[in-house]
Amino acid sequence: MIIPIRCFSCGKPVGHLWEEYKEQVDRGEAPKKIMDSLGLDRYCCRGLFMGHVELIDIAGEFKRG
């Protein structure tokens, strides 16, 4: 799945933060520290990032063609 543009609960725009979050997590930084620096203060926005799973590559394998 693709990260939503806005948080489902509060409506805050969060889609533009995903790439930076993912890069920093891959470098080994703590998710709490990253979310604090990105301004994700609400638990609903944090949960959106913590629970997100990249499935677009897997779904792309099943295309018709």
Image (spheres, rainbow, N blue to C red):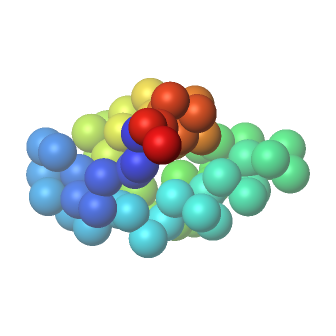
Is residue 46 something one can see in this rendering? Answer: no
Percent across and percent down for residue 44 are 27, 39
Residue 46: which quarter of the image?
top left
Which residue is located at x 17 percent, y 45 percent? Answer: 8
- Identify the residue shown where x is 32% and y is 46%: 45
Q: Position of residue 55 (x, y in %)?
A: 52, 34
Q: In the picture, which quadrant includes the N terminus?
A: top left
Q: Nearer the viewer, residue 30 or 19?
A: 19
- Could you tell me if residue 51 is visible in this image? yes
Farthest front residue in view: 65
Q: How many marks?
A: 0
In the foreground, 5 or 39: 5
Residue at x-position 48% and y-position 43%: 65
Residue positioned 13% across, 43% down in the render? 9
Determine whether, in the image, residue 28 is placed left or right of residue 6: right
Can you tell which quarter of the image residue 61 is in?
A: top right
Q: Position of residue 14 (x, y in %)?
A: 35, 62
Name the side, left or right, on which 49 lies relative to 20.
left
Residue 15 vs residue 50: left or right?
A: left
